[in-house]
Image (tube, rainbow, N blue to C red):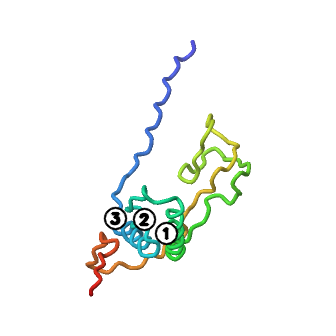
Amino acid sequence: PAEPAKPAAPEPAPPRVSLTDAAPDAALQLLALFQREGRFVDFLMEDVSAFTDADIGAAARVVHDGCKRALDTHFSVEPVRSDEEGASVEIAAGYDAHALRLTGNVVGEGPYRGTLAHRGWKVTDVHLPKLVAGHDSRVLAPAEVELA
């Protein structure tokens, strides 16, 4: 007589993801650098609804130039993919979902073929200034008082 079929082994539980709180100082330091170099926070906190598109565009150029300078000074950034946007690419099964996001008709296990819509960005090196002990990093830009 044939042996009865053994029950299938249960699916292994997905690995538990460990969450940690991010230290806010580095994020606040980055915001302060973007504010100092490009007036980023000033731009975002301003109500631009009454400004013309030309005025907003002129302000955006200043913000862009300053924030780009801060980014280039303190970070080494390079594309996740070296292919040109619009290129046909093949993505292997088991790809790194943190580095690639598939959109459109995602079916099955891969490999997948598609068109690169965005190269992505990754940081390869960080050069943030050291924080001074006791410095209140929540102050992104000090208030300015002009004396007569």
SS state under label 3 = loop
Q: Residue at x 60, y 48 (%)?
A: 95
Residue position marked by numbered label 1 in the rendering: 63
**Quadrant assignment for the C terminus:** bottom left
- Residues at circles 2 and 1 in contact by the CB criterion of under 8 Å: yes
Q: What residue type is labelled 3?
A: Ala
Q: Residues within 10 Å of mark 3 (few under 14, many from 20)?
A: few
- For the view shown, which residue lies furthest in the right direction? 88
Dot 2 or dot 1: first in sequence order is 2
- Could you say where residue 53 lies in the image, as x and y percent from the top left? 52, 59
SS state under label 1 = helix
Whether residue 93 sits left or right of residue 141 in the image: it is right
Dot 1 or dot 3: first in sequence order is 3
Q: Nearer the viewer, residue 2 or 78?
A: 78
Q: Which residue is drawn at 38% across and 52% down?
A: 18
Q: Can you tell which of label 3 and label 2 is closer to the viewer?
A: 2
Residue position marked by numbered label 3 in the rendering: 23
CA separation in Å, label 2 and label 1: 7 Å
Q: Which of 24 and 17 is in front in this view?
A: 24
Q: What residue type is labelled 2?
A: Phe
Residue position marked by numbered label 2 in the rendering: 43
Q: Can you tell which of label 1 and label 3 is closer to the viewer?
A: 1
- Residues at circles 1 and 3 in contact by the CB criterion of under 8 Å: no
Q: Which residue is drawn at 65% across and 58% down?
A: 81
Q: What residue type is labelled 1?
A: Val
